[in-house]
């Protein structure tokens, strides 16, 4: 079986257990974003890009138990890829996560494409929806005007504190457009970033809070 088709079958079973912010619809949107960006990068390896998109959240520490953190390796083993291809794929996946601003360098055009594609799905209208879907699944406040957004966090600090959903905009989402790596990613991020700014402006107006 084609490794992409095999991978898609396997990851769908994993994403069934995640909330709506990181389900398979998220993967489909990121794949669409990645192909749109890759259309402007003729040297990009589409197969490794698609495999990385499919796999990039299966071992997400937000969801994975100790056993489930091995999902990525378990699935990759079933794809029968050459060793050098496995190394390339794992390196690419590792470079995607924000990690509180502690990113691994995205040194290849494929890594840059997948990182931008994933981050595009974290901003704009769908990014707003995903933020509140995740916050709701975790029982977090919508907003907290007494909460101060953090900067210069370690990975542990970023993942350990359960901040209100609106605080997440300031700690991560509003930073993503400036960090896009591809020209197409930068272009696509502009409108989405502006929409988030407008949303927060209206939220402040409606609540009367300085959030």
Image (spheres, rainbow, N blue to C red):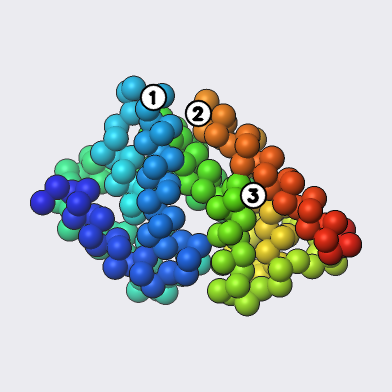
Any mark on residue 184, and which? 2
Picture layout, residue 192 above or below residue 143 = above
**Residue 33's x, y, as percent?**
43, 40
Picture layout, residue 70 above or below residue 38 = below
The C terminus lies in quadrant:
bottom right
| Residue occupying image coordinates x 38% and y 51% | 28
| Residue occupying image coordinates x 50% and y 28% | 184
Q: Residue furthest left?
A: 1
Viewer-side residue, 138 vs 88: 138
Any mark on residue 41, and which? 1
Gap between marks 2 and 1, in whole Å?
9 Å
| Residue occupying image coordinates x 39% and y 53% | 27
Any mark on residue 87, and which? none
Any mark on residue 173, and which? 3
Picture layout, residue 198 above or below residue 181 = below
Q: Is residue 18 left or right of residue 157?
A: left
Q: Quadrant of residue 57?
A: bottom left
Q: Is residue 20 left or right of residue 127?
A: left
Element class at badge 3 = helix
């Amino acid at each position: 079986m084609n490794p992409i088709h095999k991978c898609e079958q396997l990851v769908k079973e994993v994403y069934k257990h995640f909330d709506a912010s990181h389900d398979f619809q998220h993967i489909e949107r990121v794949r669409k974003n990645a192909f749109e960006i890759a259309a402007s990068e003729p040297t990009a390896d589409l197969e490794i890009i698609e495999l990385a998109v499919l796999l990039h959240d299966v071992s997400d520490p937000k969801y994975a138990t100790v056993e489930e953190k091995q999902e990525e390796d378990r699935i990759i083993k079933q794809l029968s890829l050459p060793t050098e291809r496995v190394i390339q794929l794992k390196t690419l996946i590792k470079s995607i996560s924000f990690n509180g601003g502690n990113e691994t360098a995205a040194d290849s055009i494929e890594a840059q494409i997948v990182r931008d594609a994933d981050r595009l799905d974290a901003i704009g209208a769908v990014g707003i929806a995903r933020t509140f879907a995740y916050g709701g699944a975790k029982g977090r406040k919508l907003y907290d005007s007494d909460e101060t957004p953090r900067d210069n966090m370690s990975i542990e600090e970023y993942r350990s504190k359960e901040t209100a959903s609106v605080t997440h905009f300031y700690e991560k989402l509003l930073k993503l457009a400036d960090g896009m790596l591809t020209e197409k990613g930068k272009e696509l991020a502009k409108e989405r970033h502006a929409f988030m700014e407008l949303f927060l402006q209206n939220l402040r107006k409606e609540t009367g809070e300085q959030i």
